[in-house]
Amino acid sequence: GEDVEQSLFLSVREGDSSVINCTYTDSSSTYLYWYKQEPGAGLQLLTYIFSNMDMKQDQRLTVLLNKKDKHLSLRIADTQTGDSAIYFCAAAGYSTLTFGKGTMLLVSP
Amino acid sequence: DADVTQTPRNRITKTGKRIMLECSQTKGHDRMYWYRQDPGLGLRLIYYSFDVKDINKGEISDGYSVSRQAQAKFSLSLESAIPNQTALYFCATSEGQGHSNQPQHFGDGTRLSIL
């Protein structure tokens, strides 16, 4: 089945850019998602990209997709302390989503 | 009001007890899902349902059962709870159109502790 891998932790300073990386194994995944989880809350859909796209930009968020390498990244520009959270990458399979283990982003002032 | 509501938000119980976690949604979505989240393991799918008459096992269904009482309601049961079922449980919903390409929308979770 699908396997989705992410680095577990990223620490940046406020105002810097953050880049969270994700790799997946199933080349037939049609949609790839990024979710954000703040402490004590559920997962909030941040953005997603269709597999026929290379890039998607949404305000401070930029998603890059390299289909050949099955690599997905989420860039957060001008990172703020409120961006501190766990970020999950997810790949859409035939019936369900497969989630990575999540990357904890810590933003320091 | 939340679109996906889980009850209870927190529950502490003892080994061997029967537990039911409930999920209701106002989004009008056909598809509903139950996940558990454990530190360092991410989210793992327990069961999912594409409509009222459809129930499917996920990655880790052993020890769990579900009931889809209506389009808007999907409950998860632990028939005889054990300590390694201590986790954060999430319900999610999505629209139903062909393959599972639609985004899933999550409730705020139920924190379950089994002593």
Image (cartoon, coloured by chain):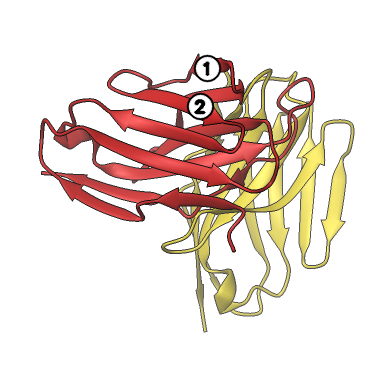
Residue A76 drawn at (x, y percent):
70, 64
| Residue at figure coordinates x 47%, y 60% from the top left | A41
Chain given the colour yellow: A
Q: Secondary structure at mark 2?
A: strand
Give the number of the mark in front: 2 or 1. 2
Do marks 2 and 1 share a chain?
Answer: yes
| Residue at figure coordinates x 53%, y 25% from the top left | B48
| Residue at figure coordinates x 51%, y 52% from the top left | B5
Residue A105 drawn at (x, y percent):
51, 62
Residue A13 lies in quadrant: bottom right
- Amino acid marked by disc 1: Ile
What label sits on residue A101 in the rendered view? none
Relative to B99, is A77 above or below? Answer: below
**Quarter of the image that includes the N terminus of chain B:** bottom right
Residue A94 visible in the shown view: yes
Choose between B12 and A31: the one closer to the eye: B12
Q: Which residue is mark 1?
A: B55
Label 2–label 1 contact, CB within 8 A: yes
Relative to B25, is B68 above or below? Answer: above
Chain given the colour red: B
The chain letter under disc 2 is B
Choose between B37 and B18: the one closer to the eye: B18
Answer with left or right where residue B38 lies relative to residue A66: left
Q: Secondary structure at mark 1?
A: strand
The chain letter under disc 1 is B
Determine the CA span between mark 2 and mark 1: 8 Å
Q: Which residue is mark 2?
A: B68
Looking at the rendered structure, the number of numbered marks drawn on it comes to 2
